[in-house]
Amino acid sequence: MTTPTESREEAIKRLNKRASDLAEATAPKTSEALSAQAVSSQAYKIIAELLGGVFLGLGLGFGADRLFGTNPWGLISGVLLGFALSIYMARRTANRLMAQAKASGLEANSIPFDDEEDEDR
């Protein structure tokens, strides 16, 4: 409760300070370890999509070869279709990650090419 000697403006300032202190204390804290873990998990997801598409195509092509008796062609077409599918899925994931980074205000800083380093060798 407020004391009788405290004015209304002082009470509002005190409450605002307590509210801002509470907001700081309850705000989620992102550390470098958590952000590095999130980046590596997204990289592993893209790698899994690349390998998974190829293996799925390999399996479907092998099954088509067994079922229809077209020995190498089902396997070859399955691997090619699986590779195309995996590239499509990895590209879609990378575009989604870039859109999330752009929405959060992060921009990639490009490093200019330096010819002087090559001249020293």
Image (cartoon, rainbow, N blue to C red):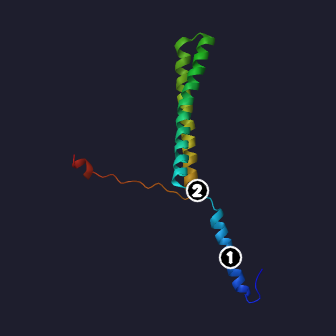
3 left or right of 46 in image: right
10 left or right of 58 in image: right
Q: Is residue 96 above or below residue 74?
A: below
Q: Residue at x 56, y 17 (%)?
A: 74
Q: CA distance from mark 2 to mark 1?
A: 30 Å
Q: SS of the residue at dot 2?
A: helix
Query: Hey, what amino acid is under mark 1?
Result: Asn
Front one among 25 and 87: 25
Q: Residue at x 67, y 68 (%)?
A: 22
Of mark 2 and mark 1, the one earlier in the sequence is 1
Residue furthest top in the image: 69
Residue furthest left in the image: 120
Front one among 19 and 40: 19
Q: Residue 64, how many percent across, how many down?
A: 61, 16
Q: Residue at x 22, y 49 (%)?
A: 119
Front one among 91 and 55: 55
Number of marks present in the image shown: 2
Query: Hey, what amino acid is under mark 2?
Result: Ala
Q: Is residue 63 above or below residue 28?
A: above
* Residue behind mark 1: 16
Q: Which mark is residue 76?
A: none
Residue furthest bottom in the image: 5
Task: For label 2, count other residues whose C-alpha is less than 10 Å away and answer few (under 14), some (14-19) or many (20+).
Answer: few
Q: Are marks 2 and 1 in contact (CB under 8 Å)?
A: no
Q: Quadrant of the N terminus?
A: bottom right
Front one among 32 and 85: 32
In the image, which is nearer the foreground, mark 2 or mark 1?
A: 1
Q: Residue at x 52, y 14 (%)?
A: 72
Q: Is residue 98 above or below residue 12?
A: above
Q: Residue 15, how many percent across, how many down?
A: 70, 77
Which quadrant of the figure has residue 49?
top right
* Residue behind mark 2: 103
